[in-house]
Image: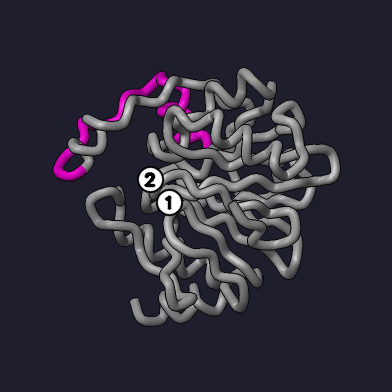
Amino acid sequence: MREVVDGVIQIPIGYVNAYAVVVDDGVVLDTGIPGRADKLARAIEAARRPIGEVHTILLTHWHPDHVGSVAELRRRSGARVVAHSIDAQLIEGGTKAQPPKGFMRVVAAIMPPPEPVPVDEALTADGPISVPGITAIHTPGHTSGHTSFLLDRGGGVLFAGDAAGGRRNGRIRRSPRMVTEDRVAELRSIARLGDLSFESAVFGHGRAISREAAQRFREFAARG
């Protein structure tokens, strides 16, 4: 794991990045694939914070590689779960996802399905959430309810989830077509994020951008 920005800790779990954010009254967590609750707990403890200090879990979207460990972490910590109301139906298990196709059928065969978990704060609009200093931005495309989160720290830190991915050269990329619901909406969301002000961006997949991250989003949107 590494500290991307002051108090923002990246926790690589296979091909997915999870994040722990140390705030004044505890820890905010963005989690990953199923069966990795122990690794996440150890990473938080390595940052000198017990798992019981995790009071909020942010979910950018419903895909199993981003919600897989949430139920177990919620049991251990008592944390509240935050997600957009559109994806909350899938996270809670009340609505079933469409059967996977193509490559995603392979992923589904090797990755256990996530345990349903209640969403305590179902977002319906952009704006501040229950954690001071964090703003939600609905960024549909990868999923209908995909949401990015902007942390007011160090010039702004964007938690982009899978709205985009990070490349080696400090630029961004789109998520693979096969796992994206609406490519047109995805590009609109990238352009919208570029209109915001933030210095750094972290992603569910790929490398973080530590400088002029909003500009990278604007450049990508301009290329279309």
Q: Mark 2 points at which residue?
A: 143
Which residue is tagged 1? Answer: 140
Residue 169 drawn at (x, y percent)? 44, 78
Q: In this view, does 92 lie to the left or right of 49?
A: left
Q: Which of 63 and 26 is in front in this view?
A: 26
Q: For marks 1 and 2, give the CA distance.
A: 6 Å
Where disc 1 sits, the SS reads loop
| Residue at x 51%, y 21% (from the top left corner) | 117
Quadrant into which the C terminus falls: bottom left
Q: Is residue 149 above or below residue 196?
A: above
Residue type indicated by callout 2:
Thr
Kindly identify which numbered label has been placed on residue 224: none
Q: Is residue 48 above or below residue 175?
A: above
Q: Which quarter of the figure has residue 171?
A: bottom left
Identity of the residue furthest to the left in this view = 102
Instruction: Give neighbour class at mark 2: few <14, some 14-19, many 20+ (Cα, 10 Å).
Output: many
Task: Give the image location of residue 212, x and y in percent.
Answer: 60, 78
Side (left or right) of 193 relative to 3: left
Which stretch appears magenta? 84-103
Q: Please report the residue visible at 74 percent of the width from the left and 26 percent of the height from the top.
A: 52
Report helix, strand or loop for mark 2. Answer: loop
Horizontal arrangement in the rendering, residue 112 relative to residue 32 (left or right): left
Residue 162 included in the magenta stretch of the image: no
Residue 65, how many percent across, how many down? 40, 39
Does the CB distance between marks 1 and 2 fall below 8 Å?
yes
Mark 1: amino acid: Pro
Residue for point 46% across, 70% down: 191
Which residue is nearer to you in this view: 16 or 66?
16
Point out residue 218 in the picture as x, y percentages from the top left corner: 49, 77
Mark 1, Cα crowd under 10 Å, few <14 / some 14-19 / many 20+, is many
Instruction: Name the residue located 44 percent from the left edge and 28 percent from the top edge.
Output: 35
